[in-house]
């Protein structure tokens, strides 16, 4: 796996406040990630999405699909 594909985003003070406010409003933890400029989120069909979600559930991991 190419370690430079994804990395934790560096947020400015205003963006960090916005993220923290949304976390509080939603009652969730958010993680801001950056990816290299050539990557695009994969467009999964319903069956592909089902398979991805099944593996997430089985592994206890969060999976991101990019092309």
Image (tube, rainbow, N blue to C red):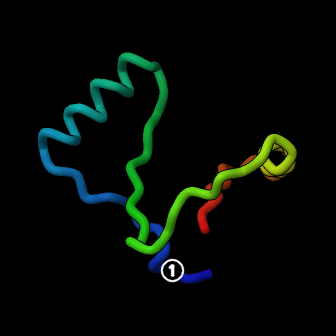
Left or right? Give the position of 21 relative to 14: right
- Badge 1: how crowded within 10 Å, few (<14), some, or many (20+)? few
Is residue 66 toward the left or the right of residue 54 in the image?
Answer: left
- Expressed as whole percent of the image width and height from the top left, the position of residue 5 reads 49, 74
Q: Tell me the quarter of the picture where residue 47 sits.
A: top right
Count of numbered circles on the image: 1
**Seen from this angle, which residue lies furthest bottom?**
2
Query: Is residue 19 rendered to the left or right of residue 42?
Result: left
Res. 63 image quadrant: bottom right
Residue bearing the label numbered 1: 3
Q: Position of residue 14 (x, y in %)?
A: 13, 39
Residue in the image at 63% along x and 57% along y: 42
Quick one: SS at disc 1?
loop
Residue drawn at x 37%, y 16% is 25
Task: Please tell me whether residue 24 is drawn above or below residue 42 in the rendered image.
Answer: above
What's the residue at 38%, 71% (across, down)? 37
List the single residue furthest toward the top. 25
Front in this rendered view, residue 15 or 37:
37
Q: Is residue 59 left or right of residue 14?
A: right
Rendering coords of residue 61 (x, y %): 70, 51
Q: Position of residue 43 (x, y in %)?
A: 65, 52
Depth check: 38 or 54 in front? 38
Q: Quadrant of the N terminus?
A: bottom right
The quarter of the image holding the C terminus is: bottom right
């Amino acid at each position: 796996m190419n370690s430079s594909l994804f990395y934790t985003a560096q947020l400015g003070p205003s963006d960090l406040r916005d993220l923290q406010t949304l976390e509080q409003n939603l009652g969730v933890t958010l993680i801001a990630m950056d990816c290299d400029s050539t990557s695009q989120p994969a467009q999964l069909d319903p069956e592909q999405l089902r398979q991805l979600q099944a593996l997430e559930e089985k592994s206890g991991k969060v999976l991101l699909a990019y092309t």
